[in-house]
Amino acid sequence: MMIAQLITSFIASAAFGVIFNVPKNSLLQCGFVGMLGWILYFFLVENEINSIIATLAAAFIVAVISQYFAKRYKTPITIFNVSGIIPLVPGGLSYDAMKHFVGNDFYVAVQLAAKVFMLAGAIAMGLIFAEVMNQLVTKYNRRKVRLKS
Amino acid sequence: MDDRLPYNEIIDVCLLAGKIMLQNGAETSRVEDTMVRIAAAFGCGDSHSFSTPTGIIFSLDGMHPASKLIRVSQRSTDLHKVTLVNSISRSISSKEMTPEEAYLQLKQIEKAGMGYPMWVQVFAAFISSGCFLIMFQGQWNDFIWSCIAGGMGFSCLFYLHRLLEVRFFAEFIASLVVGLAAMFFVQIGVGSHLDTIIIGAVMPLVPGLLITNAARDLIAGHLVSGLSKGVDAGLTALAIGAGISAAFVFL
């Protein structure tokens, strides 16, 4: 079960890299970022942690690793971010919401739509936290260098 | 600033670099940053760039103030080109390139075709649809049907993008095709779960790049571009949802 999830999330993320025309030598890294984010999300949800928290944590990890890869391979960070974020996008839930809207079941539909909105917000917040942490670390490192010299 | 600097060429190089990046899916914060860096590397330390998803204004200050505006209407996603422009801007920063050389190389990048041929992209959409089906707890016997529906939807999007000016309509039709294909497979009895097949097959159409770029632009304080990209992503999601719901009407 877990192995199937690992393999499919790797392939799906790398394939998304192809759809967005990512350079050939970054495809493996894209797949890796996507796989890591998805597995963290999957593990947390399996252990009955709120899916919003799980999405937040997964998006955070994806962004941190993307930042590391972007620095290491000297490429724009978007390349890795996109393929990592895609599996976390609440596609199934928004489909459910849409289905209920079509079926005139607005009571359930609005509830689902609100949850989709929260999940999208969680992805954005995960990216923001990672960015803030990155800035803090770079500032801290710069200060350490300055103090040494 | 001294008079020997080729101001016009510098502005052209900056604008071309910015235009290529903006057209191919870079965040506006990255576009502005790259343009100002390139200008600084050529010796114009005092420059300003303002870019939105639909246009760029770039100006050099100092003794010879000059500014140019460029309009960007066609947008697609080719992150390979963004990476190439990024590396050119790096080599300009380390003073390895003259403005003329940089301009020629950028022109070549602009003319180059997509990074991957059409069939490879459709195949990627094909495979990823099936993988998403498994990730969303689908069953293995639905794998191939989700793949086919996703591949059909994505190739539809690809052709309609060339054919039509209205992007949202292309997305609507593509997701309609996905929905109808999935329903067809379930009706004839080869596919078992309609919901998971559709969810898997719709994933290649999801505007992932827009969502991440909108978030990154908002973080960087580029509220105009962040919001407009967010609205763009929302409209795309709405078009996909409308397409799927239209398929339900046929049921």
Image (cartoon, helix red, strand yellow):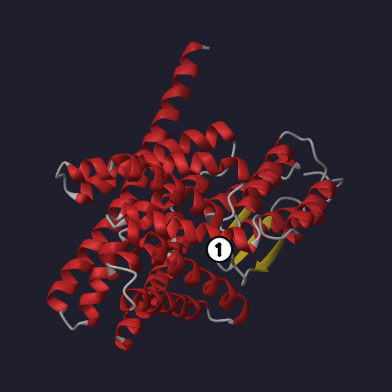
Mark 1, Cα crowd under 10 Å, few <14 / some 14-19 / many 20+, is: many
**In the image, what residue occupies the spot 76% across and 57% down?**
B12
Which residue is denoted by mark 1 in the rendering? Answer: B122
* Tag count: 1
Instruction: Tell me if B245 is positioned left or right of B24 in this view.
Output: left
Q: Position of residue B45 (x, y in %)?
A: 68, 43
**The C terminus of chain B: image quadrant:** bottom left
Residue sitting at the far front: B189
**In the image, what residue occupies the spot 50% across and 18% down?**
A146
Instruction: Tell me if A33 is positioned left or right of B2 in this view.
Output: left
Q: Is residue A85 above or below residue A111?
A: above
Q: Position of residue B210 (x, y in %)?
A: 46, 61
**In the image, what residue occupies the spot 62% across and 53% down?**
B48
Q: Quadrant of residue B1?
A: top right
Q: Position of residue A58 (x, y in %)?
A: 31, 43
**Which amino acid does the dot numbered 1 rest on?**
Val
Q: Position of residue B89 (x, y in %)?
A: 69, 43
